[in-house]
Amino acid sequence: MWASIESRVEAEESSKRDFEMKQKQKHQLAGKSLDEDQSVDVWNKLGIDAPIAPVKRERPPPVSLENNSEGETEKPSNNNVGKLVPEAPDWELVDKMAKLSEPVEGVPEAPDLEELSSMDEGVETEPEPTQAGWADDW
């Protein structure tokens, strides 16, 4: 009997050690990048023949905030770059949205939710004794 208990404890301890070693290896390898051969193998496993080249960042030229007193010329400002220029409104869409509040033929009117909730508050719904609740179905 003691031998079986000791073997269980040893098995649990060895599985715990194995798990901790795997976690430690994951943490050690997490920060390392793959070499070129490993990278190609991984891309091939993903179904991509040629790995994507990493994007090289270009540093923008430094911006000087000093005023040039020699030749002050107006430079075009880039303040509007990336901002959307407002377009004329879509009047057809505006008309359709205005008509949403009007009833449409063939579509039933939706009940007023406030009226329904006030009606529900006044009526207490207790299950009938002949109906079984969901807990009684087990």
Image (tube, rainbow, N blue to C red):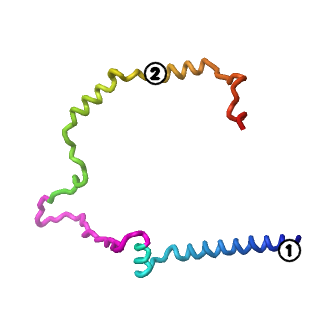
Q: Is residue 57 magenta?
A: yes
Dot 2 or dot 1: first in sequence order is 1
Expressed as whole percent of the image width and height from the top left, the position of residue 12 reads: 74, 70
The span picked out in magenta is 45-74
Q: Is residue 123 left or right of residue 55?
A: right
User: Above or below — where is 110 with respect to 48?
Assistant: above
Identify which amino acid the numbered label 2 is placed on: Pro
Label placed on residue 111: 2
x 35%, y 22%: residue: 106
Give the quadrant of residue 50: bottom left
Give the quadrant of residue 130: top right
Q: Label 1 neighbourhood size at 10 Å, few (<14), some (14-19), many (20+)?
A: few
- Mark 2: secondary structure: loop
Q: Quadrant of the C terminus?
A: top right
x 53%, y 76%: residue: 29
Marks 2 and 1 sit apart, C-alpha to C-alpha, by 73 Å
Give the quadrant of residue 100: top left
Looking at the picture, tell me which residue is in the foreground, 84 or 10: 10
Expressed as whole percent of the image width and height from the top left, the position of residue 24 reads: 60, 75
